[in-house]
Amino acid sequence: MLKKVELTNVHSGRKQSIVIDTSTDAKALIGAGKTSVETAQVSDVTGLDESIQRLTGKGSLDDKVALFSGLARCFERNLPIIKSFQLQASRVKSSTYKGAIAEIADDLSQGEKMSDAMAKHTKLFADDVIALIRAGEESGKLPEIFRRIANAQKKSSRIVKKLKTGMIYPAVVICIGLGVVITMSFTLVPAMSKLYTSLNTDLPVPTKIMMGFSSILLKQPWLAALPVIALVMFFKNWNKISAIHSVQNFFLKLPSIQNIIRKSAAAIGFRTLALLIGANVRMSTALEITADTCWHNHYKTFFTKVKEHILNGRTLPDAFLIESHWLGNDGRMICGLMEVAAETGSGTELLDEIAEDYEDELDAVANQIDKLIEPVTIVFLGSLVGGLVYAIYAPVFSLGDALLKK
């Protein structure tokens, strides 16, 4: 249920309306971040207004970064957990995160563990994040865990923003191209179709395809909206799609994409393992938690199998070497570093070093995203324009022969 809280400053009289996605008025006040110098009036948001607010009030990566970085700062200064969550209500912007903060603070006040309270909000906090928080509770390093999560989310947010910025140009080009194709299918192509049908002449395959596409759109014009709907649904459900093992394996076969995916998954896994080992968590438990935090099935399987080897009495370097094929081309290098770590007793430092190297490489890739997308856009645009030109003008060049034959 959505609640609308109208806060009024008792000194200046300034009013501000805040929407919170929560169940009770008391939680709504927590989510609104009400202070002692403000009065509040709570009302329910219903009907069309509620539908609009739910469409526009979804959480973003920026909210997640603000939440975790703020919690990390509070935990580092030993503030009470409930108070730490309450202080974040004014930092986040979306009604979803404000409501989640209110719900979590209420659950904590009733004695629930923080990880259990946050695990109830599956749309905001993924399983890997909850696994990390549980690891922080077990190791006593919650401030460091939250700082790591905030930094990881900040890097993800930066990459996503670069992707969005880089996709503006190709998205505009693709939309214009599709608009031209659809417009021609409703206007120019039907006239061409009547002309060439009356002449009873053979047409090139691209022209026949355009004429068939135009015929379908003229009979069922609502089909023109299908590409837009498909793209919206694709991006809306991308998190679920990307979690499918066959999809993950497919992206690992793409030349330029596979390195980004491997380095991203490896950086998270090795950073988590280093953190847990440094906190003196039992090795098998640390590997199990690390497997839970990995979002890619290859690395989840890798750490799970390494854990099984450890339980069977093998050393960590031997376990890494046996399962190195899961790590791709960097497998031998990582196994060599683990052997050095076993001899020198510097496992945590070397795992951190691997994670930092991967993160630096990901940052470099993020800075080049727009340059990587541009050639693909040019090829797509060139293919689209070339196909259209050929489909339209190829029959025109043979029109004289068709007319003379007629």
Image (cartoon, helix red, strand yellow):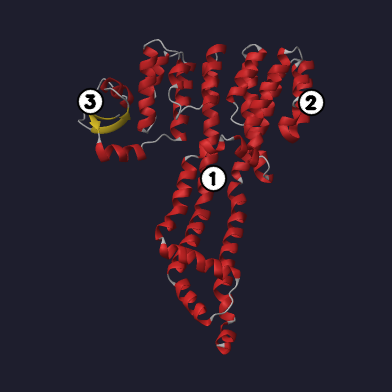
* Rendering coords of residue 312 (x, y %): 74, 13
So how many labels did they put on this image? 3
Residue 347 visible in the shown view: yes
Q: Examine the image and state in which quarter residue 404 appears.
A: bottom right
Q: Nearer the viewer, residue 129 or 313?
A: 313
Q: CA distance from mark 3 to mark 1?
A: 40 Å
Which label sits on residue 236? Answer: none
Mark 1 lies on a secondary structure that is: helix
Which label sits on residue 40? Answer: 3
- The type of residue carrying mark 3 is Ala
- The type of residue carrying mark 1 is Leu
* Rendering coords of residue 136 (x, y %): 54, 16
Mark 3 lies on a secondary structure that is: strand
Q: Horizontally, is 377 left or right of 61 in the view?
A: right
Q: Horizontally, is 310 left or right of 286 in the view?
A: right
Label 3 or label 1, whichever comes before in sequence order: 3
Label 2 or label 3, whichever comes before in sequence order: 3
Which residue sits at x=51%, y=40%? Answer: 238
Which residue sits at x=57%, y=79%? Answer: 201
Which label sits on residue 163? Answer: 1
Q: Horizontally, is 292 left or right of 233 in the view?
A: right
* Rendering coords of residue 106 (x, y %): 35, 17
Which label sits on residue 336? Answer: 2
Label 1 or label 2, whichever comes before in sequence order: 1
- Residue 304 position (above or below residue 380): above
* Rendering coords of residue 172 (x, y %): 48, 56
- Residue 187 position (above or below residue 137): below
Asked whether disc 2 touches disc 3, contact meaning CB atoms under 8 Å apart, the reply is no
Q: Nearer the viewer, residue 342 or 125?
A: 125
Residue 89 visible in the shown view: no
